[in-house]
Amino acid sequence: MATDIAFAVAVLAVIGRHLPAPLRTFLLTLATVDDICAVIVIAVAYTDDLSLTALGLAAAGLAVFGYLQNGRGQAVARVRAAVPGWLLFGPPALVIWALMHASGVHATIAGVAMGLLMRTSARDGERSSPSHRAEEALRPISSGLALPVFALMSAGVSLSGAGGFWTSTITWGILAGLVGGKLVGIFGATWLAARFTSAHLNPQLGWADIAGVGMLGGVGFTVSLLIAELSYTDPAHLTDAKGAILSASAASAVLAALLLGARNRHHRHLRAQLSDARSS
């Protein structure tokens, strides 16, 4: 866990110019849900000492944050109109983050919770929603600074003592989980949803396309590295985990590129046939 959306979309963009648009939508939705599930796992499995006071204050802060975002009263509307967004929501966000950290729950929960509380629809007098404006403002910082710095700081793998890397059960467990497990989980869950619920696969897509995205879902090293840091205290075990995560992400990207490349050629051929049929 979880799918690195920036890298997964980059692979899809490079090798899948003729893939149907719904496949990209499927990948974006999958990555969002995957991130939420990963954060829940971090909150539940990696919280040792819980401070109910700090957690309660963080929850109260989230309630205020949500009200400022979504409240419809005249008073809160006047506040939103008079105070710049970065000043209105920035300081409370920092306080909520600090309180969540102090509670013992991993502070990433605060970011996800605030993201879910942000309004996604524009109201009268607004050119776009607060969520959209925040995404545009934070994207350069997130993609250009935060993500690369986190990846560089977390991905360091010491080569000393790495001779037993491929004999470690940690290595093979992570490889199986990311390369095989993500494929089985994504493809299997989608098939079960289409088989036993009212959901159905988009007519433009085939199950081979879903399998390709399932493989692409194995490209997930940033959150995986974070979970590895939380999981392993032995430096040797952490080295094995980091090496396995990077290897698995690379293998998933290559396998997905091969399958989705074949599907890209298939869809390109179908479009050519359809274009010929229309012209004739």
Image: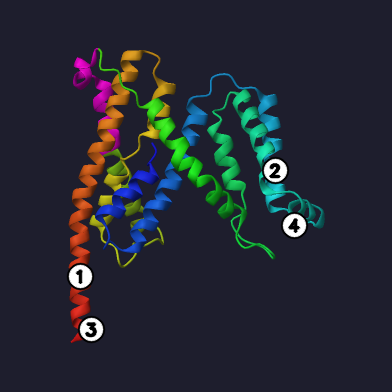
In front of the other: 126 or 108: 126
Query: Which numbered disc, 1 or 3, marks the residue that appears first in the sequence?
Result: 1
Apparent side of residue 135 relative to residue 159 in the rendered image (left or right): right
Q: Which of the two discs, 2 and 1, sits closer to the camera?
A: 2
On whether residue 13 falls in the magenta region, the answer is no
Q: Quadrant of residue 168?
A: top left
Q: CA distance from mark 4 to mark 1?
A: 50 Å
Magenta-drawn segment: 161-179
Query: Which numbered disc, 4 or 1, marks the residue that appears first in the sequence?
Result: 4
Residue holding disc 1: 270
Q: Which of the two discs, 2 and 4, sits closer to the camera?
A: 2
Residue that appears at 20% across and 16% down? 164
Q: How many residues crowd mark 1 within 10 Å: few (<14), some (14–19), many (20+)? A: few
Q: Which mark is residue 17?
A: none
Q: CA distance from mark 2 to mark 4?
A: 20 Å
Q: Which corner quadrant holds the N terminus?
A: top left
What's the amino acid at mark 2?
Leu
What's the amino acid at mark 3?
Arg
What's the amino acid at mark 1?
Leu
As helix, strand or loop, the secondary structure at mark 1 comes to helix
Q: Which mark is residue 278?
A: 3
Residue holding disc 4: 72
As helix, strand or loop, the secondary structure at mark 4 comes to loop
Question: Is residue 223 in sight in this rendering?
Answer: no
